[in-house]
Image (spheres, rainbow, N blue to C red):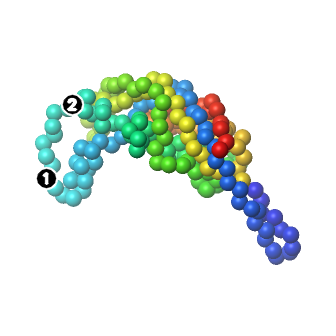
């Protein structure tokens, strides 16, 4: 929204109007979740602190699977809210007239975790880590999933633009592992419903 001028040399800043909406996103492809496990975080910290590296424990697929989930405070499966903002901001590169700097200040996602609706299953994948070393990863996959994202935005952007932005983000960026932004087909989504609070 442009800044108005009423008198020469005088700037008039329009009133800031804030709206909050709940945007329901429905997955168009499975969502692969991979949170840092407590063990992985501890190993990283020990290495940075110069502590001796302990011998790696035998792989426990079930434990690796359980520790790869994100959880909401109430114990439900969740996903970091910041991922949805990052996807929407990154989608600006696909759209003309919008910049990432503008979008970072135009809207915000409320809270740290967004609850995931859906039933997970264990996924087994061969991956390359470090210097190209092969490893097997056991991670949660939600074949069918949806989330309701609480979005707070100002009058510099319209609700219609927010909806188009989230649709573009779900198509071109996605969330989670092997998403389109990382040359994969997973974690894609679209807007299915919007409820204003």
Q: What percent of the width, then of the height, locates residue 85?
A: 55, 46
Name the foreground residue: 100 vs 22. Answer: 22
Q: Is residue 131 left or right of residue 120?
A: left
In this orientation, does residue 30 appear?
A: no
Q: Any mark on residue 60, and which?
A: 2
In this orientation, does residue 145 appear?
A: yes
Name the foreground residue: 34 vs 120. Answer: 120
Q: CA distance from mark 2 to mark 1?
A: 23 Å
Instruction: Identify the residue under disc 1.
Output: 52
Specify the quadrant that holds the C terminus: top right
Helix, strand or loop at mark 2: loop
Helix, strand or loop at mark 1: loop
Residue at the bottom extreme of this rendering = 9
Q: What percent of the width, then of the height, locates residue 161?
A: 70, 43
Q: Are marks 2 and 1 in contact (CB under 8 Å)?
A: no
Residue sitting at x 27%, y 45%: 38
Residue sitting at x 63%, y 30%: 192
Q: What percent of the width, then of the height, locates residue 92?
A: 62, 45
Residue sitting at x 55%, y 37%: 148
Q: Is residue 138 left or right of residue 164?
A: left
Image quadrant assignment for residue 2: bottom right
Q: Is residue 116 left or right of residue 13?
A: left
Name the foreground residue: 155 vs 131. Answer: 155
Specify the quadrant that holds the N terminus: bottom right
Q: Point out the tag, 2 or 1, that comes first from the N-terminus.
A: 1
Q: Any mark on residue 155, and which?
A: none
Residue at the right extreme of this rendering = 7
Q: Is residue 148 left or right of residue 161?
A: left
């Amino acid at each position: 929204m442009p800044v108005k001028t009423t008198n020469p040399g005088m700037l008039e800043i329009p009133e800031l109007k804030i709206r909050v909406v709940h945007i329901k996103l429905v997955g168009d492809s499975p969502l692969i979740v991979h949170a840092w496990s407590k063990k992985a975080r501890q190993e990283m910290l020990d290495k940075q602190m110069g502590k001796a590296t302990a011998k790696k424990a035998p792989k426990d697929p079930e434990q690796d699977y359980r520790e790869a989930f994100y959880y909401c405070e109430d114990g439900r499966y969740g996903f970091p809210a910041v991922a949805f903002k990052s996807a929407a901001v990154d989608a600006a590169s696909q759209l003309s007239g919008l910049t990432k700097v503008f979008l970072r200040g135009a809207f915000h996602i409320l809270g740290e975790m967004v609850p995931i609706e859906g039933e997970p299953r264990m996924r087994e994948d061969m991956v390359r880590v470090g210097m190209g070393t092969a490893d097997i990863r056991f991670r949660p996959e939600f074949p069918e999933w949806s989330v309701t994202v609480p979005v707070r935005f100002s009058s510099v952007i319209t609700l219609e633009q927010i909806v188009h932005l989230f649709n573009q983000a779900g198509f071109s960026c996605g969330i989670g592992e092997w998403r389109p932004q990382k040359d994969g087909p997973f974690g894609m989504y679209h807007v299915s419903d919007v409820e204003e609070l």
